[in-house]
Image: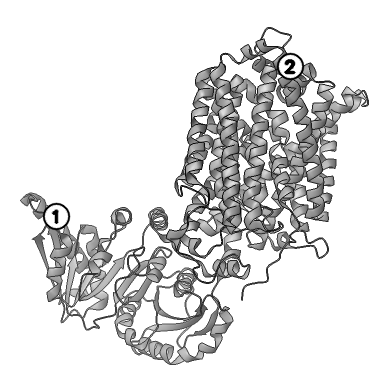
Amino acid sequence: MSQPQTELSRDLSLFDVTMIGVGAMIGAGIFVLTGIAAGAAGPALILAFALNGIITLFTAMVYAELGSAIPEAGGGYLWVREGLPGPNAFLAGWMSWFAHAVAGSLYALGFGSYLVLVFSELGMLPASLDTPWFHKVVAVAIILIFVAINFRGVSETGTAGNIVTVLKVVVLGIFIVSGLWAIYRHPIYLDKFQNFAPNGWIGILSAMGLTFIAFEGYEIIVQTGEEVKNPRQTLPRAVFLSLAIVIPIYILVAFVAVGAVNPDTNIPTYQWLAEHAELGVAEAARQFMPLGTVLLLIGGLLSTMSALNATTFSSTRVSFAMGRDRNLPNLFAAIHPRTRTPYQALMVSGALITFMAVAIPIEDVAAAADIMFLLLFLQVNLAAITLRNKYGDRLHYGYLTPFFPVIPILGVVTELFLAVFMFHYSAVAWYFTGAWILIGLGIYYFYARKRLEARTRTPIMRAERRTVPQPEKGYAVLVPIANPDSLPVLLRPAIQAARENDGYVLLLHVVTVPPQLPLSAGRRYVEQSRALTDQALQMVEDEGVEGEVLVRIAHQPAQAIIQTARERQVRLLIMGWRGRSRNPNTYIGSNIDTIIHQVNCQVMVVQQTPPPPFNRFLVPIADPLQTPYALAAVHLLADPRFSEVDVVHVFAPGTEQARREALLGEIQAQIDAYRQAHPGLDDMRISLRGVEGSNVLDVLVQAARKHDCVILGATRESWLRQQIFGNLPARLAGQLETSVVLVRPQTGPVGFGLARLLHYVRGGYRIIEPTSAQELQEQGILAPQPIHNPEDLHTAVNKKSLLGAGLLGLLSVLLMYWGDGSGFTWLGVGIYLLCLFWFTWSSVRGILAAT
């Protein structure tokens, strides 16, 4: 049975969650980065914010879908864990935890700087205290305050965050209104927007990369999945409402900062803002607002506080989810009995934020947080595609992404482009990102993966060996056994391979248990397997070969076979096969396909009907390098005294005679070399011939009628090609009436890794991991059985309405750029904001209709 789950309390409303997202996005970035980004993009900072909004909406729709269907703490990390293979989940959580911690330390340092400036403006701070170390002291103090607030629980966290977020929106509202009034009184100020993009698209893209961190609030929204009321409806609405609030504020702040300022020097306003850098907005406010600098500094304080609160909350939830999944030590999963908060994850996250604020050169790594958020969102978009195909018929959705899978694909493409472009903006950020990812991979492979495998390991219920003890290292032949009828055909090659390589035969019997039952339910059936395993072990030992029996309990046989092969470092795996798979997503069968793509050793798959003896073998050879592996299979199955082997190569019509002779000569050389290396095959008749045909399948099916067994194999070199263009051996096997043996040699680590990746892309992502599925069922997220047809998954959002909003939004962006600060630019801004509200209204309406 799976371990008890630690859960959080549900206290947050739609307003609370929306304010958490708004508070995270309207953080120090809008105050600190606006001046710097204006220097990069010029007046086109407005366009940079608008384009970031479009890119954000692609991923926001995906977050809304997954947040409504799988509302758990962990957000993007959790979905990547369920949707992508290998270390992807660990890296998603690892990058998310770091990026939020970096953002939190930035906000804390920003708070320290702004507070010191406020007191300096009011004449309340001695000059001796206006030093970097005092800024850090203040930063540490505010971090500790918000750690304490988060420790008290989400209701207190939400209340504090709501107050701060509302106040800073009010401050920004005053800033915007005052600036708009100044521009209204001085229409000539609009001339400052001429030469709209002085640095071209390079400047616009640089500003987009710099400010993208200001759009990641929906990642923090979904972290509340286990603490929000009615998450299926609340989370997706909060995602869209928060963006509908924030994106117009960004655009209007950029418009006012550039347009309402009259620099003392004869330089463009955007350069003046760049010179003032992080204080650009505050200095702008000084010109057109009563007490402008002080008021904006107070707004900066409020912004940094709410953003620090949100990032502290989010980094804690990510590390909590990773601890609960055993990717991090167990202390991260601890829940305080009174406050029901992950207090130890909070303490460690708070310590990480504090350390970065005090000891790390945060300016050098801040851009890395942008890149890590982009990579995280890219992973989530990919996971959304796989999860819809994997679990789509068993999830309860509150929102479905329209135009699926076009929207997540657009998210992947745009975020990948922006992440790569960040190298142009800051190569150091990419170096730091790469280093952090490498550290994470090291932790995963040397620590986390072992804990994860222990979590899903199938128990060994019986191990028996009646001969001499197993050597520390030996040639292990693994044979999964399930019924007595298959023993002769499976054990003959296993015994022969073990005898020739001075090895032993490992007999594995798997007791399977339905996914909805705990593994302990299989204990009662363990003894029932003794007759089968005793018979198999006796057959092995009668041939003078060492044997061992293992009996394991698993939800799926493949799971136990893979774990055994890896634990024992098996050299040869021999499996039985009933016939061609009926599943169009697998070549042979779901269990066998899974195994051969997870275990890198020599594999032999033997069709169990019709049974042996085999005397006449057909060995089709496409590449001369296949020859030794195919003959090795014949060697294990045949009696050399009575066997005939017909090696065949099929030539396409019109093949030149010289080419035919050269290829047959290469194959014959391989046959002679194999005979020389194995003197025991002297009595075996091996013939080689070439045949002609335009359809290889038809030719081989016709030739196989005179044979007992067909050996189909692959070479190391052709494995990748087979994965790309299809598996001819499996398709051929489906049309033959004679017994078929499929052979796959061990491959190099790089080729094996590529083969696994391609197998995953071609349908392996649909394979459900029993432990994860059971946990999702226990939490009420995943239905035990399909609840709807995947083809019937249609969004409740009006797609025509969204398409209209999207097309007009693209038109608005073109108008902004081509208008070059003229009336067309402002027409584009107006259309863009109208489309944003239109999109939000359609999406929220669809969510309410669906739930």
Front position in the image: 93 or 136? 93
Residue 766 placed where, x, y %?
44, 62
At 67% from the left and 58% from the top, the residue drawn is 230
- Mark in front: 1 vs 2: 2
Query: How many numbered circles are shown?
Result: 2
Disc 2 secondary structure class:
helix
Image position of 436 (left or right of 651): right
Residue at the (62%, 50%) spot, across then down:
236
Q: Check disc 1 and give the amino acid type.
A: Leu
Please tell me the numbered disc located at residue 562: none
Q: Secondary structure at mark 1?
A: helix
Q: Residues within 10 Å of mark 1 (few under 14, many from 20)?
A: some
Location of residue 322 with respect to 570 vertically, above or below:
above
Residue 595: x, y in percent? 41, 68
Disc number placed over residue 663 in the picture, else none: 1
In percent of the image, x 77 and y 48: which residue is there?
351
Residue 240 on image: x %, y %: 62, 44
For the residues labelled 1 and 2, the Cα–Cα distance comes to 84 Å
Furthest residue in direction left, as rendered: 657
Q: Mark 2: which amino acid?
A: Ala
For the C terminus, the image quarter is: bottom right
- Residue, disc 2: 182
Q: Earlier in the sequence, mark 1 or mark 2?
A: 2
- The quarter holding residue 248 reads top right
**Front residue (pair 448, 797):** 797
Question: Is 619 situated left or right of 747 in this image?
Answer: left
Where, quadrant-wise, is the N terminus in this rendering?
bottom right
Query: Compared with residue 381, is residue 520 higher up or lower down, i.e. above or below?
Result: below
